[in-house]
Amino acid sequence: MGRVYIVGAGPGDPDLLTLKAYRILREAEAVLYDALVGEEVLEIVPPEAFRLFVGKRAGKHTLSQEEINRLLLELSRTYTKVVRLKGGDPFVFGRGGEELLFLLRHGVEVEVVPGVTSATAGPLSALIPVTHRGVSSSFAVISGHGKEVDWERISGADTLVVLMGVRRRREIAEELIRAGRDPSEPVAFVEKATTARKRVIFSTLDKVAKDPPLVGTPAVIVVGRVVDIGREALSYKHLISNLKHLSRFLLGNAGVEAQSVEGVPEDLPG
């Protein structure tokens, strides 16, 4: 019987894949993967390996969780290295625990490879820290699908990060206001975090509850005063980028090779 690796693929940027995950994917003989796993990550898998998409499309599961569990068991009896590949970290709302227990109960050897979770990487890709001295000393991660969430209990955290909550963003904002959060509290939606198509939308709880902005999926929702830190950081980053491009334009028109402008080194990130 083979070994099953439950592997986190990270939040989207293939450069955020761990070295261990990369090594295991290169040696994989069979891979079951979800919707949020990027093509660049899948390209690491040997072309001769068995691959099967088992995620959700158009809100519908291609296979039930029970069917995925049974398939992993069957594959472990055929291949020596089977990979269950999930976006982010497989144990943050990824049902990794269910698959782990099922396989172990059936005598299958399992190895877990943690991934970078979008719960922290998503906000940080918009320069939003989930904790910040004097602003936030706690944060909570919530599933937007969860109808059993105790909103009063969870709203006590300084920062809230909601995954898979875009479709219920109005209801989530209403629940948080009812639970005692300040209606004027800042909110950020980080769409397609860590990828080249990333987009950040700023709002407030009361505005989201009354007239939610248009947001694509996947997106991470951040609620709390740390959002203002991200907004300020992004404004500085854009200012530095604009000054850098302006310096290149002015020096280029003057026939001077663009090296630097006082206070704006040429090698600053754009």
Image (cartoon, rainbow, N blue to C red):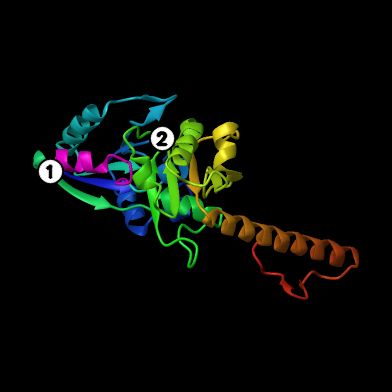
Residue 40: image tag: none
Circle 2 packing at 10 Å, graded few (<14), some (14-19), many (20+), is few
The residue at 54%/43% (across/down) is 183
Outermost residue toward the bottom in this view: 262
- Res 9 seen here: no
Left/right of residue 109 with respect to residue 133 in the rendered view: left
Provide the secondary structure element on which disc 1 rests. Answer: helix
In this rendered view, identify the residue nearer to me: 101 or 174.
174
Could you tell me residue 73's position as x and y percent? 16, 35
In this rendered view, identify the residue nearer to me: 72 or 114.
114
In this rendered view, identify the residue nearer to me: 1 or 230.
230
Quadrant of the snapshot with the N terminus: top left
In this rendered view, identify the residue nearer to me: 265 or 257.
265
Provide the secondary structure element on which disc 2 rests. Answer: loop
Label 2 sits on residue? 35
Q: Callout 1, which amino acid?
A: Leu
Quadrant of the snapshot with the C terminus: bottom right
Could you tell me residue 168's position as x and y percent? 46, 31
Circle 1 packing at 10 Å, graded few (<14), some (14-19), many (20+), is few
Q: In this view, does 220 lie above or below 254?
A: above
- Magenta span includes 98: yes
- Work out how far the residue at label 1 is from the one at label 2, CA to CA, in angstroms: 25 Å
Label 1 sits on residue? 104
Q: Callout 2, which amino acid?
A: Ala
Left/right of residue 255 with respect to residue 110 in the rendered view: right
Left/right of residue 249 with respect to residue 71 in the rendered view: right
Outermost residue toward the right in this view: 254
Q: What stretch is highlighted in magenta?
A: 90-104
The mark nearer the N terminus, 1 or 2, is: 2
Could you tell me residue 149's position as x and y percent? 34, 38
- Res 136 seen here: yes
Q: In this view, does 203 lie above or below 265?
A: above
